[in-house]
Image (spheres, helix red, strand yellow):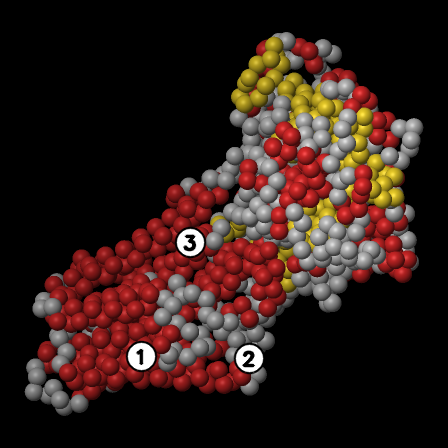
Amino acid sequence: MGTHPSENPQASEQAPWHTLSIEESIAKMGLKSDLQKQGLSVDEAASRLSKYGPNKMTEKEKVTIWQRIWHQINNVLVYVLITVAVVSLVQAVTTDNSNTRFTAWFQVALIVSVITLNTWIGIYQEGNAEKAADALKNMLSTDARVIRGGKEIMIPAGDIVPGDICLLGLGDKIPADLRLCSVSNMATGEAALTGESVPIDKVTEALSPPDGLDPEQVPLGDRKNMAYSATLVAQGSGMGIAIATGDFTQIGTINRLVNNTETIKTDVLKQIDQVSKYLFVCICTMCTATFLTAFFYTDTYSGDALGSVNIALVTAVAMVPEGLEAIVTLTYSYAVKVMASQNAIVRALPAVETLGSVTVICSDKTGTLTQNIMSLTAFVTSNARYKNNVDATDRVPVNFVRDDTYLASRAQHDMKKTGKDIVADGPNNPAGRRGHNPSNHFTVDSLHATDNPDEAAANAALPPDDGFPVKNGESPSREWIQSALSCGVLCSKCVLGEGGGRAGEIGNPTELSILRASYFAGIDIEELKNDAPIVAEVPFSSDYKFMATVHEPAKVDNCPDGKYVCFVKGAPDRMVKLCKYQAKGGVAGDENLEDINENYWIEQIAILSSHGLRVLGLCRTTIDKDSVKAGDQLGPEFVNGRPEGKWLTMVGLCAIMDPPRPECVQAIKEARGAGVRVAMITGDHKDTATAIGHMLGIVDEKYSEAVTGPELDAMSDEEIRKCVMTHNVFARASPQNKIRIVKALQAEGQVSSMTGDGVNDAPALKAANMGVAMGKEGTDVAREASEMILADDNFATIVYAVKQGRVVWDNLRKVLLVNTPINNSQGLSVLFGLLVKLPQTPISAIQILYSNFICAVTLGFVCAIEPAEDGIMELPPRRVGKRLIGRFLFLRIVLGTVLLTGCVVGSASIIEYGGRYDDWSVEERERMMRGVAFNVLDFGAISVMLSARFAYNSSIHPRVFQGNPAAVFSIAIVAVLQVFLSYVPGLNSFVFSMRGMDGFGWGLTFASMVIVFIAMESEKAIRRHLKAQGADTDDRETPFFTDGKAPEVDMKMPKGASKLNLQELNH
């Protein structure tokens, strides 16, 4: 907007528009009564544009390149590197010694290169993550049709102002919040606000708030005379008055709320900062100790202040982990790349680490745990039950199989319920999902089913299997499927999507499921429609809940001459009341007519409803051709007002649901094995949620019941904290419920991941430890509020990401295990070399810088990209507050440091004092000493890396060279470079102050490698033994090296979340 939102006149001009009539709305805005015909004048539109500003949402302030750079270098370790670089620069400028000058300049160049590389990697990866999220943006309308000055014109959507008359057609994106003043069979898809994929029917009449609610508390879904910015016209057409634009639309308001939320720093980043501070103290201590030792204790530097400072500087260079920042960033970056290849787009690198500690995944149902495609699951006839393979990809009749045990009795929790209660808790409830009119147009008004289990079982009993039309376990013919489902196919205005999918489909999802089942059974939908052209129809209406069409008979209809076939599809309870006959086995023809068994069909409706299935009745009959004329628009009395009363034939019941994704069942099983709970949060009915929960394995003996949103609303903070620990299914939930669930879980010490796709989910995504937005069906605001985006909207991707989060944590620890001993041993080698009175430091400053860098970017990189170890998803989640460096990792680092330091100083001492090289000159002996120490250090580092590749599993195994090609390559690179630097004349002597080794030197090198490797593996073997004895070798319970504090959570709703009273969750 041109002005701050609080200064915009719209802030004070909002009103409960849905409660006002069209005339009152026009008057409230101070506009002329002929607005609907004339629209705004050109001058009035210009004046309002100046007054209210353009129709655009305020964008979040962009981070500048300088802010990004500062974010990357604002670290104590970087400060230490800069300090060393400055001191080296001063030394390079002031010294007269050419070797010292070269070494100092080399140090400056290398340190600057490392800082620049770290910064570039961080900025590059952040930019990639932002581009991945930005690529998903395409929400707001770009153009709009309006009436201005009595003429219909197209204008940029940004020029829409309050008071504009906007014209809407099928497929249009709504450019602003509108009070509808004219509709023609109009429905809007409000996925941009709620993620709900089912269109919402629209009206124009003023609406009165329900008892007990003020106008502002009425859910958006119930404001049927309103249309909202960024939503889509799914059917029909209409016209509306713009009552809010830009930041004052519903989507704009919550966008502002999300953009004002601060980013939280993750645990690993805090720990890296803390480790950096500890390292800074250690470096200062070691520098001081080295200076004092050199100045007061050694013979070479005794009393030489400048020489002692130089030696202390070498220690500082040795202990600063120049490559650590780059490797930590690369560890994250590699994980992000791997996850992106599996459709998980991480928007911020450190968020990867959070995934590893997730204990509860709170997931939406529709489209995440389920396929978001309504599918015909079962078809019930008078004598059989048919199961349809909803996951089929081949178009064959065998997708249908007769299975008389499938859904043959009520769900256990509904055994003793009446039909009325079963309907109330299921998807056939006329009330629909919470906050929306029902997407199932064929809901049940009343179902008089018994609450006596024995009587219900008797009513549901099938007759003995007589093999008609097929035996139990066999598949029916394509002709039978076409005949049985032809009512659902022909009595429909729906258009099936390309290849049977959702792309390009038109119509109600419930009806489309029958077309989809027919398509995958091998039926040619278009050919069937051509063979049986429509003659007349009774259009669907929610008043009578059925649709009827009259057709020329097709070959499979078995229709007498002189007759039309009439198909009626509708609410099952109403269809049963209109039926006189039932088709035996669902087979058409007068010879297969039987008197209808109403109790049987009513109980079947109750059974299917109890399992959370939508139920649709398919009926047929024949009529004389002279009773209707082609093109007749028949009224409902054609079906329900006939003098003969009951006259239809019941063919069968369609049982329809949005089935679980098949891969989610295994993913949930894997999550449970990893100690991660999966909770399902849905706006759907309790029975539907429970049924899906059973199929997915979320509902079990421990978490056996679902709890509803209204029940959560009535709970205190203490009650909801207990509830979230005993329930995995939350039905009829609202966005407010989502936030309370997250906060309650956090108050119980849980680390929660929350999925969401609508704008109203954004605050809950922000509140969660790990917000996960949908990439296909989700909204831009939800994505901006999240840390991760699922490009495929698939729950299984979340579980994969959790696994990768654990891998990242393990790999960060492995990187520390490799890099830290190398750095420590370099500094300690200098100090202990002075303590044993070596004439020079065992390794030079250039050797130290080289080892730091090459070991980090090769050996450290190997650990950064290690694949998951076997059994990683059999371990419980990482405990909250657990340190990167726990007790046993600390001991391993100490062990590695001691081993490397001992080998380096020991080998140097053997060369210097062993007597083997006493006849060499002092200079040559020092170069040999440094050559051996240099190679012992770097080849010993290879041993540390090989051991560190596996946290628990033994590395004395062929797998040490398998699973990660980088391991072999890095060893080869380090080894080749060591040989190259050791033997190239000039490079070895002038730059690295060493000489090529003889056989004895290589013997010391390889002996040191073996010592380090065996010692590290022995420690691992001891730790495996302790773990087998039940010891806490993972620091899961021990507070040492951990925070040991449970998080304090404010259970209050976030500021601005009251806006969510306007929207409801419908997943």
Relative vertical location of residue 1048 with respect to residue 924 in this rendering, above or below: above
What's the amino acid at mark 2? Asp
Mark 1 lies on residue: 900
Mark 2 lies on residue: 1032
Foreground label between 2 and 3: 3
Residue at the spot x=37%, y=61% of the render? 327
Counting the numbered discs, the total is: 3
Can you tell which quarter of the image residue 639 is in?
A: top right
Q: Position of residue 68 (x, y in %)?
A: 41, 47
Q: Position of residue 649 (x, y in %)?
A: 82, 39
Label 2: few (<14), some or many (≥20) within 10 Å?
some
**Quarter of the rendering occupied by the N terminus:** top right
Q: Nearer the viewer, residue 441 or 833?
A: 441
Label 3: few (<14), some or many (≥20) within 10 Å?
some
- Find numbered disc 3 in the image and state the secondary structure of the residue it sits on: helix
- Residue that extends furthest to the bottom in the rendered view of this protein: 915
Foreground label between 1 and 2: 2
What's the amino acid at mark 1? Leu
Q: Position of residue 489 (x, y in %)?
A: 68, 36
Residue at the spot x=74%, y=12% of the render? 33
Relative vertical location of residue 197 with respect to residue 787 in this rendering, above or below: above
Relative vertical location of residue 798 with respect to residue 642 in this rendering, above or below: below
The first of marks 1 and 2 along the sequence is 1
Mark 3 lies on residue: 337
- Find numbered disc 1 in the image and state the secondary structure of the residue it sits on: helix
Q: Nearer the viewer, residue 310 or 950?
A: 950
Residue at the spot x=74%, y=55% of the render? 467
What's the amino acid at mark 3? Lys
Relative vertical location of residue 391 with respect to residue 799 in this rendering, above or below: above
Q: Are marks 3 and 1 in contact (CB under 8 Å)?
A: no
